Image: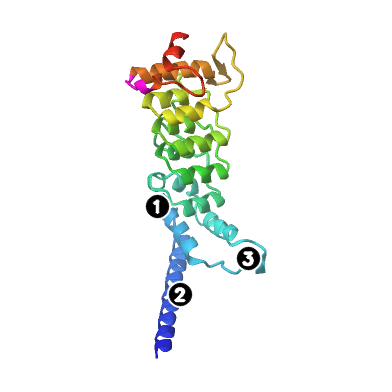
Amino acid sequence: MQLQTNLSKCQINAHTLKQTLSGHALLAFMFSRQEGKLNRQQTMELGHHILKAHIFKGLSKKTGVSSSVLQAMWVNCSTDSLSAALASLRNLYTPNIKVSRLLMLGGASVTWCTEVVGRAPILAVHAHLGHVEMVALLLEMGAPVDGTTDSGMTPLCLAAAAGHTDIVSLLCKKGAKVGHADKNGQCALVHAGLKGHTEIINILLGQDWGSENPADPQQPHGNENVTGKTQAAQQAVTAAASVGHTQMDSHDSLWGETGAFLLSVR
């Protein structure tokens, strides 16, 4: 009797699952066949239903094409709002990682400039907001690690200012330019100093800053300013002191000197 009860429950669950998958497939087809352009939210919903429908499950062996590629082709053929959807406010502030990956595979631009944080590239916004999974995904998909906002802030500058240690470490591992200075002449180290993020300061000081020209520690490289390590450290100490972060005067294990000493040789 118990076995029959369990079998009945399994049949009900299987039927419910089948209905759910059929519902997602139906909604996906409905969005795909909709007249007119899909808006950003509809594009996100389309991606969600495509992923949930599992229509292409089991076809990889038969076709030699992975289901993720087939799903990406589906979303690509259904809308021209992929990039706009990826950069929509909802997906910026509450990102859907799986749908975002699908949109990128379908052709969404990872260099798209958003409408927030000074027209920041998508990567910069997620670095600013602390979305480490999205930052990792965008870097995996080829997003430029040093894309800038209108004010010249890079993802590293924004992450350092916001105190997102894990993102700072990730960006540094991916080759972010630690010496890049924004239009105010402030690099990531200075932004970290202004907010008193000592752990991030130590991470940044431990990076390879390249060669320095003592005669010109802050020199233009093409259209960008690059600050040398010594100059950046002095600026960071000054910035931290100006807003009351006196802990910066403690002995620094990386430099072997105190913040007061760095100020004295400025």
> Residue 195 placed where, x, y %?
37, 27
Q: Earlier in the sequence, mark 3 or mark 1?
A: 1
- Quadrant including the N terminus: bottom left
Mark identifier at residue 194: none
Residue 8 point in image, percent of width and height: 41, 85
Examine the rendered structure and indicate whether residue 210 appears above or below residue 10: above
Q: Position of residue 186 (x, y in %)?
A: 45, 21
Q: Nearer the viewer, residue 205 or 255?
A: 255
Amino acid, disc 1: Gln
Q: Nearer the viewer, residue 251 or 102?
A: 251
Q: CA distance from mark 3 to mark 1?
A: 29 Å
Q: Main secondary structure of the magenta part?
A: loop
The residue range painted magenta reads 243-247
**Residue 127 within the magenta-colored segment of the rendering:** no
Point 49% across, 39% down: residue: 112
The image position of residue 110, as x and y in percent, is 53, 42
Which residue is tagged 2? 18
The residue that mark 3 highlights is 60
Q: Tell me if I can see residue 33 in this picture.
A: no
Left or right of 261 in this view: 77: right
* Residue at point 47%, 57% (across, down): 47
Residue found at the far bottom of this picture: 1
The earlier-in-sequence mark between 2 and 1 is 2
Q: Nearer the viewer, mark 3 or mark 1?
A: 3
Question: Toward the viewer: 89 or 236?
Answer: 236
Determine the secondary structure under disc 3.
helix
Residue 11 occupies which quadrant of the picture? bottom left
**Left or right of residue 243, residue 83 in this image:** right
**Residue type at numbered disc 2:** Lys
Which residue position holds label 1?
A: 41
Callout 3, which amino acid? Ser
**Distance between mark 2 and mark 1 Cα atoms:** 26 Å
